[in-house]
Image: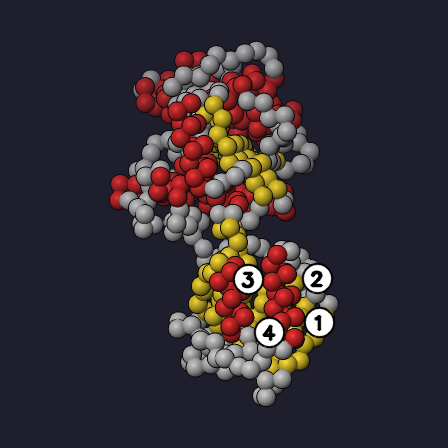
Amino acid sequence: MMEPAGTPTETTDQDREKFLEMFARSIREGTLVKLTLGKYRGSVPGLTAISIQMSLIRETHFLEFDYRSAETTRTRRTIEEGTALVRELLGGDFRSGNLFTRTADYQIEYSKRLKTRFSASRPTFTEAPSMAHDREKRRLIETEGNIYLQRLGVIEESGRVKERMGDKFRQISRFIEIVAGLFAGSPLAERKELSIVDMGSGKGYLTFATYDHFTSVLGIATGVTGVEARPELVDLCNGLAEEAGFQRLRFRPGYIRDVALEDGVDILIALHACDTATDEAIHKGITAGAGIIICAPCCHKEIRPQIVPPDVLRDMLGHGIILEREAENITDTLRALLLEYNGYSAKVFEFISTEHTRKNTMIVGVRHGRAVEREKIMARIEALKSFYGIERQALETLLAGTGEIPPAVC
Ligand SMILES: C[S@@+](CC[C@H](N)C(=O)[O-])C[C@H]1O[C@@H](n2cnc3c(N)ncnc32)[C@H](O)[C@@H]1O
């Protein structure tokens, strides 16, 4: 849409300055809900009004201008550009302004002779507006100007996803979609501050995207820590976090089993951590009282050698590949049951199509805070283990505190 030009007028009265000062102050003090410019007298066909709201994109505030006509067109401006444009338009092409802040509403109207009427009233909105600039329409991961996806080799400078990185981009997007959905439906949804830990963060694809989503899209003050055994990846990711200006995203070297979450954690992530490192991560999450635990196991080595095939399954489990899959299914079922035992609603599902990777089972737990029938759940755990002749499972051992588990190997 063509932008309306400001028509110079002779109106430079105090009312206009007062109104513009209230607008600037509401931006400074973070109380702006929205500003609507109406009574359009310019030459753009169909345009009726502009609605202006603040957004927070990668820790920088912007003003989003919604040009209202048959269709709404949005443009984003820096705070300086946006306030300058409002100054140009108010009293020019637009002859009314309605400013909604959390402390008061302000109105300014121009008569045909460009005389102003200014008034203030009690605030219509007292809740802080969402800084998400368009929750519905916005892509889960904004590629435009996305430094971390560029540096991680997922996208071109233009924002286009590289051809060979399509699967990786889909995986990251799908992951964020899952996290966003879980978060929205969880008791954490009202939180204004969050702490997230990503265990075995690797090159940080998901860690960066998670930080970006919670801070930029949802506008929540979020601290994210990636824990990674390989120091070179930690250095790479810390450098990138700095370059991206992600102030509360940090990576630290070390093993999952050694991580101390003494300050608690709200969301614990562990995707593709090897073998029983997944159990160590879930254990850390449960004991730290995480509201959401999300993991996607990598390899499963612990259970397979323990299985004593029940008679009825002897033929089936005589095939190596079926035995391997059965071992994976038993392990992940036990993990889900142990989450339930500890007060979480647990789900196990396929999170991306098998054509992208076979490591695509996801286990999620959302802490519900309701009473749990622990004896019944434990009876189901014991029945499953005894059916397959299983003596120990790492997560159970860790939670019971009945012994050490050997370091995970991939
Ligand atoms: C397959 S990568 C997955 C990275 C990332 N979570 C993802 O899904 O994109 C697994 C990473 O976990 C790290 N890792 C494996 N076991 C670990 C442990 N016990 N403690 C810390 N990091 C571990 C590995 O070094 C590797 O970088």
For badge 3, the amino acid type reads Gln
The amino acid pointed to by label 4 is Gly
Tag 4 residue: 97
Instruction: Indicate left or right for 113 with 301 as reference.
Output: right
Disc 3 is placed on an element classified as strand
Chain-order first, disc 1 or disc 2: 2
**Residue at (62, 74) in percent of width and height:** 16
Q: Mark 1 points at which residue?
A: 120
Q: Is residue 19 left or right of residue 145?
A: right
Name the spot of residue 141 as percent of width and height, x first.
42, 48
**Is residue 384 visible from the viewing direction of this image?**
no
On the image, numbered disc 2 is attached to which residue? Answer: 103
Furthest-right residue in this view: 122
Q: In this view, does 105 lie above or below 93?
A: above
Q: How far apart are marks 2 and 3 (CA)?
A: 16 Å
Specify which label sits upstream in the sequence, 4 or 2: 4
Task: List the residue tagged with mark 3.
Answer: 53
